[in-house]
Image: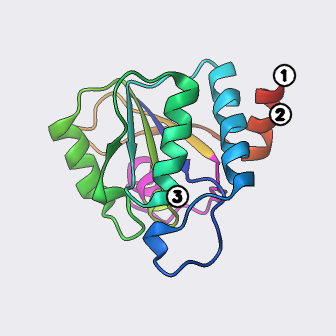
Amino acid sequence: MNLYIIRHAIAVDEYEDDSQRPLTDKGKKKMRQIAKGLRALGVDFDLVLSSPYLRAKETAEILADVFKVKADVVFSDNLVPSGDPDLLISEMNEKYNAHSVALIGHEPQLTALVGLLVSENAIVDMSLKKGGVCRLSADDLHHTRKATLEWLITPGILVEIGEN
């Protein structure tokens, strides 16, 4: 199983309701370039699972559009900023049978998920920038919470790849 941990793209800074903060025009454009960069790397998804917060939802929709994902984007409350990584893994095990999954959410929840999967819940000192992508691989998350960190790519590098 491949997990692509993706932080939402650039959103407006302040909004009355944090869950309704939309992406900026720059964020939308940059996310489209990031998605093209991922596609150029040969990445593919069986499932796009996203936080229901607007900025993550818009990020997921751009990704699904660029990749021509046939299935609808699925939303999980376990990907909101206060979400529980353990509950997210349980949800994935119980509800979805996918080989390659894009998980779109927020910091610090995404870094906590990476920490849980690659270092048995230790704090991982990494920076997942807006639009950044981390690829993990795992044989199976049903019996163990272990994954291998394959790569972490900044949005700037993905934009460059997507432009070529």
Query: Where does the image place residue 28, in percent across and percent down from the top left?
Result: 66, 47
Judging by the rendered image, the residue that carries numbered circle 1 is: 164
The answer to which of 56 and 144 lies nearer the viewer is: 56
Which mark is nearer the camera, 3 or 1?
3
Q: Which label lies toward us, 3 or 2?
A: 3
Answer few, some or many: residues within 10 Å of disc 1's Cα (few below 14, many 20 plus, some between 14 and 19): few
Residue type indicated by callout 1: Asn
For this view, does 67 lie left or right of residue 126?
left
Residue kind at label 3, given as amino acid type:
Arg
Q: Provide residue 16's location: percent of width, then percent of height.
A: 50, 82
* Residue 55 badge: 3
The numbered mark at residue 160 is: 2
CA gap between label 2 and label 1 equals 7 Å
User: How far is mark 3 from mark 2, CA to CA?
Assistant: 23 Å
Q: Which residues are magenta?
A: 113-132
As drawn, is 67 to the left or to the right of 80?
right
Residue toward you, 67 or 137: 67
87 falls in the magenta region: no
> Magenta segment: does it hold 118?
yes
> Counting residues from the N terminus, which is met first, the one under dot 3 or under dot 1?
3
Taking 128 as reference, is 14 above or below it?
Answer: below
